Amino acid sequence: MSEENNQEEYEEITSEEVDRVVASLEALIESTDSENIRSYLEEAMNEIYYLVYEEGEEEWDSEVEACGEDDEDLSEAA
């Protein structure tokens, strides 16, 4: 029975699905006026992205951090 529980808990998430969801969230973020909602969406986008990609991927980090932010220093940090 413990083997069945392990199989039920594991879910394979593809990079294609993550890319599609992240792109959808980016479009939603761009169309959102509320800074509070935008912040939650950006956090969700980051969490979803890191399901399949490592945190050390600097190119993505600079795009995500710069998305919806007015601070230009964030894109230069990467």
Image (cartoon, grey):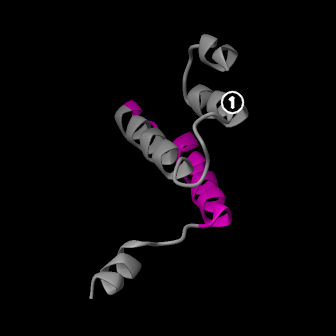
Dot 1 corresponds to which residue?
58
Q: Is residue 66 above or below residue 49?
A: above
Quarter of the picture holding the N terminus: bottom left
Seen at 34% across and 86% down, the residue is 4
Rendered residue at 68%/64% (across/down) = 16
Answer whether residue 68 is magenta in the image.
Answer: no
Where does the magenta region start and end?
14-35
User: Residue 41's image quarter?
Assistant: top left
Q: Residue at x 54, y 44 (%)?
A: 31
Q: In the visual, does 9 lie left or right of 24?
A: left
Q: What residue type is labelled 1?
A: Glu
- Is 61 or 53 nearer to us in this picture? 53
**Image vertical order of residue 66 relative to residue 18, above or below:** above
SS majority, magenta: helix
Is residue 70 rendered to the left or right of residue 32?
A: right
Residue 31 located within the stretch drawn in magenta: yes
Quadrant containing the C terminus in the rendered view: top right
Q: Where is residue 36 in the image (x, y as percent from the top left)?
A: 35, 34
Q: Which residue is drawn at 59% across and 52% down?
A: 22
Tell me if residue 32 can be seen: no
The residue at the far left in this view is 1
